[in-house]
Image: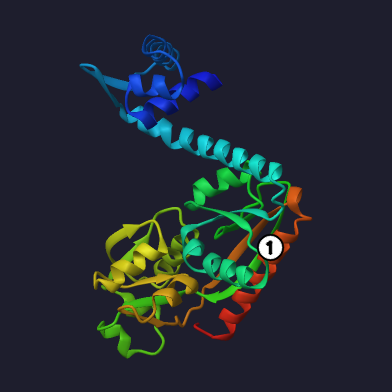
Amino acid sequence: MLNLRQIEVFNALMVQKGVTAAAIALRSSQPTISRELREMEVELGFDLFHRIGKRIAPTEQAISLFDVVKRAFLSTEEINRVAMAIRDNNATYLRVACIPAYAETLVPETMRRMSDRSRAAHLVIRSLEEAALHQDLSSQIFDVGLTEGVYDPGKAYVEELDVGNVLAVLPAAHRLCAKRILEPADFDGVEFISLAQGDPYRSKLDALFTTAQVSRLYTIETTTASAVCSMVAAGLGVSIVNPLTAAHYAGHGIELRPLKVRIPYRVNLWRSRRTSRSLLADKFIATLREIISEFCVKRYS
């Protein structure tokens, strides 16, 4: 098991991309860092770096390990920023974690309205894919979390917010634009851009089309709804995404259509019990609810 010092050395090597630079960053010496690296590799049982003359290059195992380590170091930096905010008596400090779809749609408008109504606040927004987001929420570093899937990390208040129904997104000139409402059968044999395996709404859509015995032509699979919409706008296929992202891209080479079979879409709001008395978190959540309520009134679906 690696200790904190070894993790610190590994992070410096990955960030600085060299033993000498890592030694300078850690105020150590090149021989010391080289020795600690060898000890780490012996303990782990695999090489972290390829030696190419005086240079090093990370192995595939090191790259995989760094995906986890860098999140830990980002969390450490976040702790330091919070400490500085406390030192400077900055009480208006809020940490929000969300999936990319909300960082692009809900969160910017929430922040804009908050800044119009009150004095400046320091907000930290962490945008992560759902699986990574769950791990970070468990650390209790964040005050508010917004997820798609139902997730309870413990010691938290969790609330579902109804947003409407998922929507079909179509290239502006696509033949399906001639229809006002789409049925599962309309997608049979149509090039379809899909969200990645494991996405909660991907699973619901797959079940819908399987039940309807509809075979879509899978062309592209990607991890975010915004990427899906960009692909649709480029004319690479059609798709079905959350109504927030769909509305955000409407008119940018994309047309929206509701589905005859409705699939409700909900935002899961997570709030740490540790910060349940935060006035800034109260304002953020109240503003978020206001925006979602207005969105639903527009009846995109």
The residue sitting at 64% across, 41% down in the picture is: 84
User: Residue 118, located in which quarter of the rendered image?
Assistant: bottom right
* 189 relative position to 290: left or right: left
The residue sitting at 44% across, 67% down in the picture is: 205
Q: Nearer the viewer, residue 220 or 281?
A: 281
Is residue 216 shown to the viewer in this render? Answer: no
* Relative image position of residue 206 (x, y in whole percent): 41, 64
The residue sitting at 68% across, 62% down in the picture is: 159
What colour scheme has been applied to the protein in the rendered image?
A: rainbow
Q: Is residue 232 above or below residue 86?
A: below
Q: How many marks?
A: 1
Q: Nearer the viewer, residue 162 or 293?
A: 293
* 80 relative position to 179: left or right: right
* Relative image position of residue 102 (x, y in whole percent): 51, 63
Find disc 1 in the rendering and name its residue. Answer: 159
Q: Nearer the viewer, residue 232 or 72?
A: 72
Q: Is residue 11 above or below residue 147?
A: above
User: Residue 227, located in which quarter of the rendered image?
Assistant: bottom left
* Relative image position of residue 122 (x, y in whole percent): 61, 55
Q: Tell me if mark 1 has few (under 14), some (14-19) or many (20+) residues whose alpha carbon lies within 10 angstroms of its own.
A: some
Furthest toward the right, the residue is 277
The residue sitting at 39% across, 79% down in the picture is: 250
Amino acid carrying label 1: it is Glu
* Relative image position of residue 273 (x, y in whole percent): 75, 50
* 298 relative position to 181: left or right: right
Is residue 149 shown to the viewer in this render? Answer: yes
Furthest toward the left, the residue is 53
Q: Secondary structure at mark 1?
A: strand
